Image (cartoon, rainbow, N blue to C red):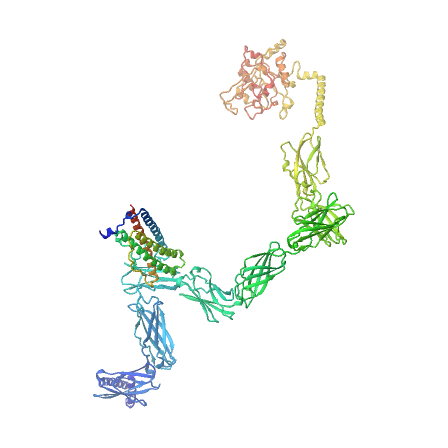
């Protein structure tokens, strides 16, 4: 500013010089030079410089300048505002105060007067060169709430000295710990209102204020829009710290017993002299945070809900344990289901559900206040520890004349609050107490008076009550009544439309007419109403006795509804020959026998109780005769009853009666009867005692002029069942091919339905193997006959086999099913004619064949002899050496037996002498077989059978199976050849006769001799030949016979047998000729040996 | 005769056999009561720590023995005192414990209103402590000794913090257990010494 002044000054004084100096550079240099000289000169002489002006309130400017203190001492200044009416100021100080000047520039002339000389300094001053620096603030008040760790700061904004509506920004700094760390910095904005205002600010510390020192300072900034100068923050206020708790408590751990919301973050500190070793939050160990030399802290985040006794926070030192407890819980839930009602219109009960548990109990539990807005009254909830878990409720005493209540239920606990509101018209929220003292009194048999007590003042409303009327017979009935509410509590009401002489059970409950809730039911009260006159006469019927001399009159007991009391007796009156007769029958009896002739009369019956007699019931003794014979009809029930239909008959003026009885009962037939109106055309008879499978007789009567006429007679079943017994049947007659059975009727009581037919089953089988119990129609071996003609009592079964056993079964059936069956076993007789025929025909045929054969044989005996047994047989033509046809059947190669060139090696001398020479000749025949090798016979390729003329047979026990030729050991049994010599094609007996008894010539066949056989025979030697042996064709025998020798060569069809050959060697096993051997003279051969299984047999 | 000898109990010196047997029965009955209450006191302490939260229920929990003005644990020298003197101390301590237990019950009723069994045990313990103290005094009277002078009324801080209240409760329950057990021992010793 001073430079500015100088520049202005020089600019004025130098205008002339500028004119003289043309060089700008020279001019500028001169100015700088002069300025510096002036400065040096001014300072040297105490000339004011650096004039600065500030304002605290925009009203007064406080200006100061710099001056050498040496020179300044003893200097007097005169400050004048040029061209201003403001008087000059004389001062020895280097600052002055002037009222705020206008926006224009103002020249300030400061004259310094000193002994060393005077000087004048001029400054140009305007508002832009003035700074607005608010005055330093003093904190008016600083307090702390240690329970909440909250600081409260108050200060005055000095609004009275500052421009109105100025915006002010406040900056507050809280410092803590010994080293004054910044705890928080807060900025606030306010507006000045033209007068002093007290502002306050609070701050809640994260850590308890007791844990360490806290300091506060404040400054501010005024944002005055109309001020064009510089605006600056005020100086900080002096630091203020918090004085300690007002009462020093012996606590070392802070905060003490704090109640916080669940999820809070907390800092706990312990202020003790000795070092803290550990800290624990519940069961959790925590790390220590050192605050200062005496204080440590722990931080807990997101605290969970505490147990009932809180969560312990424990700090442990070497010698001690310090702790506190924190209770973390929820704020109270909004009360749910808030409901207010009255039970007596004297007090209102408000109940609610507290909702979610807060987790806080005891003194920290939720407190409830019920506030009524209209009256301004409230009720506080008193916690009853004994009923803590029950529904919460408060009782509010009603205010006279007030029906509408506006309740607010306020819930609060240390961590929060909530409320619920309800507007109640109590006359619509009446829930009366339970009615009591129920009393009943009589009016008449059908009406009573009910008295009860209901506490409360219901004078202003109408009560709605419900009476429950219970009887054992008619069940439950509810009747609603309205009763004018009373101030007193005694109520009474009449109840009518009751039944006489009936035990009733009453109970009652009430509500208001504007229904809200029923009260609870009162206790029950039983009461028997008075008796009344029976309302109608008994239902009567009569039956004539079997002898027709008396009538039995029946009546039914009156129902409870009709009797209206206890029936004491029945009065019966009728007219007889002696005049009007009266009978009095005591109650349990419901029939009376009256001796009557066949005269018609009217019988009257009345029931009597203590209240009087019923109207009479009348019936005539006689029936109207039925004009035609009634046909008995059949009927089957539907469901539980029997349905009858009849045509409408206008002549029937009284009613219809259906009477029924069990058909198996003896007369008189009466179980029950039922009456129907005269205009009815049908009836359903339902009777509890109807039983399925029981036949009942029904009789329909019509009433005409008080007289009954039988209209229909019906038999029926309510439900048909299958017969319970089997029909009893017998076999009347049997023959070789038929059976006649006869059966009896099944008794009605066993039939259990209308008989529809019989099922007759029969099957062939042996006794004791009956399948009769499992007869099924689907089985093919069981025949069944369905007899639908129920009058049929016999059945003949035909087409049976003679002398054969049959199982019979007979069953009866109804529409209800098939009954059990009766089974029987019968054997048909033998068929004798057939048997005779069967015997005679074969015998006759046999005789005939025998005769014819005999005749033929006789006539052809010569030919037969020539052919089969010639005197000198020609082997070539011998038929005997051909195989029997039957033997050869199946053989593809029927051949004449070729004689094996087995040269007789022995000549058998027979008894006939004449044969001896022939035998001698035979002995000369050389057998080529003797020369052949043994194997040669096996290798014979020709397709023919070679019958070795060898000793017969052989039994071999071969050690090795399968005919192995290499078998080393074989046993060969030689059989007397003589015994085997038998002729071919003769009965065995004849053969034996021929071989043993025959002493003549034995026919032989010539056998073609092959070289191989010859060799074999040659090898054996001629002496081994055993004479003539009959041979035959080999294929005539069964080659598969176990004993039939076969060729070893399987490819060869030539089989050699008949010779006693070893199956191993195929060598003829005829023993060597032994002249002395007696066997040789008996050498022979028989076909029978070929058929022997074993030679020994 | 020394003081100790003067307090020596000689049950046999009682005049009649009936009074002796009555005294013996009384001592035996009181001893049985003390033994029963000893087991109850253990259960009470266990029940108490269960409801105080950790670390009270932890095995490592061993708080410093808080001083209860007017009542201390049985001194180590207690067993060296004469029998009657010991019984006098027992009776005084038991009588002092009763109001302390009442106070603890009230504190716990705020902290654990739903811990009905704990509250009932505390209430019972208060009654039983007074009953046992009275029974011991009866025994003392029967032995010809007068009950000891009432000690200073034990006091608890008026508004202890919750944690301190828990600690005090723990301490009082412990004291109760110690004194009941001590009484049982003293009565047992009296029985052995006098009847043996």
> Vertically, is A35 above or below A380?
below
Quadrant position of residue A466: bottom right
Q: Residue furthest right?
A: A627
Looking at the image, is A593 positioned above or below residue A82? above
* Residue A247 seen in the figure: yes
Q: What is the x, y in percent for residue A518? A: 54, 62
Which residue occupies the foreground of this view, A905 or A790?
A790
Q: Residue at x 64, y 23 (%)?
A: A886
Q: Quadrant of residue A793?
A: top right
Percent of width and height locating residue A754? 70, 43
Residue A873, horizontal then vertical, whole percent: 65, 15
Foreground pick, A114 / A983: A114
**Residue A264, visible in the rendered structure:** no
- The relative height of residue A16 versus residue A393 in the rendered view (above or below) is below
> Does A1061 sit left or right of A103 as displayed?
right
* Residue A676 left/right relative to A453: right
């Amino acid at each position: 500013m001073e430079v500015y002044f100088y520049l202005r000054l020089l600019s004025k004084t130098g205008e002339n010089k500028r004119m003289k100096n043309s060089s700008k550079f020279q001019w500028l240099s001169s100015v700088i030079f002069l300025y510096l000289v002036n400065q040096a000169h001014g300072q040297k002489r105490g000339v004011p410089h650096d004039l600065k002006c500030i304002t605290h309130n925009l009203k007064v400017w406080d200006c100061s300048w710099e001056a050498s203190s040496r020179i300044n001492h003893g200097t007097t200044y005169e400050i004048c505002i040029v061209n201003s009416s403001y008087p000059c100021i004389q001062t020895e100080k280097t600052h002055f105060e002037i009222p705020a000047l206008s926006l224009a520039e103002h020249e300030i002339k400061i004259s310094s007067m000193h002994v060393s000389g005077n000087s004048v300094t001029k400054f140009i001053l305007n508002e832009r060169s003035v700074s607005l620096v608010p005055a330093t603030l003093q904190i008016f008040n600083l307090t702390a709430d240690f329970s909440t760790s909250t600081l409260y700061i108050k200060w005055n904004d000095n609004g009275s000295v500052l421009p109105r509506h100025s915006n002010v920004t406040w900056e507050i700094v809280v410092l803590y710990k010994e080293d004054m760390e910044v705890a928080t910095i807060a900025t606030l904005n306010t507006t000045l209102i033209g007068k002093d205002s007290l502002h306050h600010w609070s701050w809640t510390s994260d850590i308890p204020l007791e844990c360490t020192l806290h300091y506060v300072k404040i400054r501010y900034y005024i944002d005055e829009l109309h001020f064009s100068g510089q605006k600056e923050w005020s100086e900080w206020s002096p630091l203020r710290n918090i004085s300690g708790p007002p009462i020093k408590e012996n606590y070392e751990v802070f905060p003490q017993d704090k109640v916080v919301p669940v999820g809070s973050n907390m800092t706990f500190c312990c202020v003790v002299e000795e070092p803290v070793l550990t800290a624990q939050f519940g069961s959790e160990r925590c790390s220590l945070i050192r605050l200062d030399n005496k204080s440590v802290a722990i931080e807990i985040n997101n605290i969970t809900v505490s147990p009932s006794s809180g969560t312990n926070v424990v700090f442990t030192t070497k010698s001690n344990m310090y702790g506190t407890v924190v209770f973390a819980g929820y704020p109270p839930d909004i009360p749910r289901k808030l409901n207010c009602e009255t039970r007596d219109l004297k007090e209102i009960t408000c109940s609610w559900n507290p909702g979610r548990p807060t987790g806080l109990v005891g003194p920290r539990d939720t407190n409830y206040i019920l506030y009524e807005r209209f009256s301004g009254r409230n009720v506080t909830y008193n916690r009853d520890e004994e009923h803590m878990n029950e529904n919460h409720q408060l009782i509010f005493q009603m205010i006279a004349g007030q029906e509408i209540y506006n309740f607010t239920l306020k819930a609060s606990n240390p961590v929060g609050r909530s409320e619920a509101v309800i507007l109640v018209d109590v006359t619509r929220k009446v829930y009366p107490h339970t009615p009591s003292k129920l009393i009943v009194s009589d009016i008449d048999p059908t009406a009573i008076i009910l008295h009860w007590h209901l506490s409360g003042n219901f004078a202003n409303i109408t009560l709605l009550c419900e009476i429950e009327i219970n009887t054992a017979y008619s069940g439950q009935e509810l009747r609603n009544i309205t009763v004018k509410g009373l101030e007193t509590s005694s109520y009474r009401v009449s109840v009518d439309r009751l039944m006489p002489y009936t035990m009733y059970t009453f109970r009652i409950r009430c509500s208001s007419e504007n229904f809200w809730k029923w009260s609870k039911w009162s206790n029950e009260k039983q009461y028997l109403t008075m008796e009344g006159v029976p309302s109608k006469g008994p239902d009567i019927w009569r039956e004539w006795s079997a002898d027709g001399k008396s009538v039995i009159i029946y009546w039914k007991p009156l129902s409870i509804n009709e009797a209206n009391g206890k029936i004491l007796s029945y009065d019966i009156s009728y007219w007889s020959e002696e005049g009007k007769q009266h009978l009095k029958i005591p109650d349990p009896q419901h029939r009376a026998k009256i001796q009557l002739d066949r005269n018609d009369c009217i019988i009257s019956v009345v029931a009597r109780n203590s209240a009087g007699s019923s109207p009479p019931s009348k019936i005539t003794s006689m029936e109207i005769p039925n004009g035609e014979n009634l046909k008995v009809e059949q009927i089957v029930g539907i469901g539980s009853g029997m349905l009858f239909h009849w045509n409408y008959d206008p002549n029937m003026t009284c009613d219809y009666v259906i009477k029924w009885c069990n058909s198996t009962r003896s007369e008189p037939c009466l179980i029950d009867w039922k009456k129907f109106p005269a205009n009815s055309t049908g009836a359903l008879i339902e009777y509890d005692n109807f039983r399925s499978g029981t036949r009942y007789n029904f009789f329909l009567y019509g009433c005409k002029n008080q007289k009954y006429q039988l209209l229909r007679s019906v038999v029926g079943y309510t439900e048909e069942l299958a017969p319970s017994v089997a029909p009893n049947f017998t076999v009347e007659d049997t023959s070789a091919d038929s059976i006649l059975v006869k059966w009896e009727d099944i008794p009605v009581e066993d039939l259990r339905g209308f008989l529809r037919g019989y099922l007759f089953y029969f099957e062939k089988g042996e006794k004791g193997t009956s399948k009769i119990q499992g007869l099924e129609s689907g089985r093919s071996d069981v025949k069944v006959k369905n007899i639908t003609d129920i009058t049929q009592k016999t059945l003949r079964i035909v087409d049976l086999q003679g002398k054969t056993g049959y199982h019979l079964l007979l069953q009866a059936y109804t529409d209800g099913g098939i009954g059990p069956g009766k089974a029987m076993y019968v054997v048909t007789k033998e068929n004798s004619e057939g048997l005779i025929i069967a015997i005679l025909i074969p015998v006759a045929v046999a005789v005939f064949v025998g005769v014819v054969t005999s005749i033929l044989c006789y006539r052809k005996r010569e030919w037969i002899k020539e052919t089969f047994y010639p005197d000198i047989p020609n082997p070539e033509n011998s038929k005997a050496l051909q195989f029997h046809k039957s033997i050869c059947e199946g053989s593809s190669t029927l051949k004449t037996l070729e004689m094996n060139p087995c040269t007789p090696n022995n000549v058998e001398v027979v008894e006939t002498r004449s044969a001896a020479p022939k035998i001698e000749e035979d002995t000369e025949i050389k057998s080529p077989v003797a020369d052949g090798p043994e194997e040669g016979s096996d290798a014979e390729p020709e397709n023919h059978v070679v019958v070795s003329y060898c000793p017969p047979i052989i039994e071999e026990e071969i050690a090795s199976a399968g005919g192995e030729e290499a078998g080393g050991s074989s046993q060969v049994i030689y059989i007397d050849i003589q015994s085997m010599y038998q002729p071919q094609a003769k009965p065995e007996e004849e053969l034996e006769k021929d071989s043993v008894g025959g002493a003549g010539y034995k026919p032989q066949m010539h056998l073609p001799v092959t070289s191989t056989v010859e060799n074999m025979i040659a090898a054996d030697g001629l002496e081994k030949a055993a004479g003539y042996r009959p041979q035959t064709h080999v294929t005539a025998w069964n080659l598969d016979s176990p004993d039939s020798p076969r060729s070893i060569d399987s490819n060869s069809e030539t089989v050699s047998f008949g010779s006693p050959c070893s199956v191993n060697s195929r060598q003829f096993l005829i023993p060597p000729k032994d002249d002395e051997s007696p066997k040789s003279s008996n050498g022979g051969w028989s076909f029978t040996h070929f058929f022997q299984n074993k030679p020994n047999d | 005769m020394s003081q100790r000898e003067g307090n020596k109990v000689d049950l046999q010196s009682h005049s009649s056999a009936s009074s002796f047997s009555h005294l013996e029965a009384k001592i035996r009955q009181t001893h049985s009561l003390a033994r029963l209450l000893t087991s109850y006191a253990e259960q009470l302490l266990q029940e108490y720590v269960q409801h105080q939260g950790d670390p009270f229920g932890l095995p490592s929990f061993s708080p410093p023995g808080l001083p209860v003005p007017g009542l201390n644990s049985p001194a180590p020298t207690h067993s060296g005192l004469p029998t009657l003197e010991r019984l006098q101390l027992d009776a005084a301590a038991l009588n002092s414990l009763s109001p302390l237990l009442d106070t603890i019950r009230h504190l716990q009723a705020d902290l654990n209103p739903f811990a009905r069994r704990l509250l009932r045990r505390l209430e019972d313990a208060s009654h039983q402590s007074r009953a046992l103290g009275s029974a011991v005094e009866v025994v003392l009277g029967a032995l010809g000794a007068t009950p000891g002078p009432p000690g200073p009324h034990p006091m608890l801080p008026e508004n202890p913090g919750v944690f301190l209240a828990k600690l005090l409760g723990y301490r009082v329950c412990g004291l109760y257990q110690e004194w009941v057990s001590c009484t049982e021992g003293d009565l047992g010793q009296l029985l052995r010494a006098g009847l043996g």
